[in-house]
Each structure stands twice: as C-alpha cells, then as structure tokens.
Amino acid sequence: MQLDQIKEELLRQCQSHANQRLDRIIHMIANIEESLSSETKSSAGDKHETGRAVIQLEREKAGAQLAEVQKVLEIIAKINITAVSTIVRLGSLVTTSQSSYFLSASVGKLIVDEKPYFAIAANTPIGKLILGKKIGDHFSFNGNRITIKKID
C-alpha cells in the first residue's frame, strides 16, 4: 500500500471510530430522554425526585460526551493528509524508533496493511511531545529515549 493510501485509511478509520462513538452517544441520549419522560410522579415523592436527579446527571454527562465527540469530528475534518511538512503537525504520520503515530484523534491502535499505527491527538502526552519536532529530534517517554525517524 502506498503512503497516501495508508494515510487515507488511517483517517477513514479515525472518522469511523468517531462516528460510531457519536451514534452510541446519540442513542444513549435518546434512551435517557425516554427514561426522563416516562418517569411519572409517584406517591414515593423523594424516591421519584432522586430518580429524576440521577437521570438528569446522566443526561448532562451524555451531553458533555456529545460535545467532545463533535469537537473530535471537527478536528478530523480539518486534517490535510496531503500537505507535506518537515515538522510534525496534525495529519502527520510519524515513524519513531519505537512506533508509528498518526497525529489526528485519540483512537488508539489501528492496523493498516498489517502494520500497527497509533492514532493520537495533539493534546495527548505523546502528541504534545512530538508536535513541532523534526526528523532526528529526540523525546523521552516513560523513561525511553525515542527518536523521530520519518515524517510523512
């Protein structure tokens, strides 16, 4: 597989992961809304109010997750995998002495053409360390000295 195809597939997998997460969150919100609307006033009083409060907290948590995944999708949409750069930036495929990283969204390990890549966001610990680096630069992570060998 050629480099541009690898980057396209990595980006596609990141988008797919984020879209699946979005679908799960939307489904969860719909279930929460259904629970909230079906919660009827009962003679238990306090028990009812406690149940509504718990459901409301779940709705707020799901809303925060929804906002987060929408931000990730916005970041993924801005990635230009065809731009050439000598420094690590969003959309870079970085080969180091230990692993290969695709600077995009925090998805984790992806396999393309039987090779492992780690899709990471710029605000992750490794993302912060490699962002703006050049070929030959070093960084330390978990006590290991890692060298940037290639940037595509």
Image (tube, grey):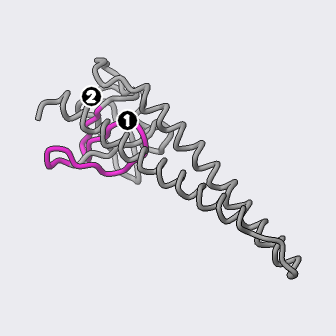
* Tag 1 residue: 103
Q: Nearer the viewer, mark 1 or mark 2?
A: 1
Q: Position of residue 52 (x, y in %)?
A: 77, 67
Q: Earlier in the sequence, mark 1 or mark 2?
A: 1
In depth, the one of 95 and 107 nearer the eye is 107
Which residue occupies 18% across, 31% down? 5
Return the mark for residue 151.
2
Measure the C-alpha gap from mark 1 to mark 2. Answer: 11 Å
Element marked by disc 1: strand
Residue 138 part of the magenta-drawn span: no
User: How many numbered dots are placed on residues in this image?
Assistant: 2
* Residue at position x 83%, y 72% in the image: 41
Q: Is residue 61 above or below residue 44?
A: above
Callout 2: few (<14), some (14-19), or many (20+) C-alpha neighbours within 10 Å? many
Q: Residue furthest left?
A: 1
Q: Main secondary structure of the magenta part?
A: strand
Of 120 and 50, the residue lying toward us: 50
Would residue 113 be counted in the magenta stretch? yes
For disc 1, the neighbor class at 10 Å (few under 14, some 14 to 19, many from 20) is: many
Q: Which residue is nearer to you in this view: 14 or 54?
A: 54
Query: From what the image shows, is residue 91 above or below residue 59?
Result: above
Q: Is 55 positioned to the left or the right of 144 in the image?
A: right
Residue at the extreme bottom of the image, as rendered? 44
Kindly indicate the quadrant of the structure image that contains residue 59: bottom right
Instruction: Report the span colored magenta.
Output: 93-115
At label 1, the amino acid type is Leu
Q: Which residue is drawn at the image coordinates 62% and 54% (left, top)?
A: 62
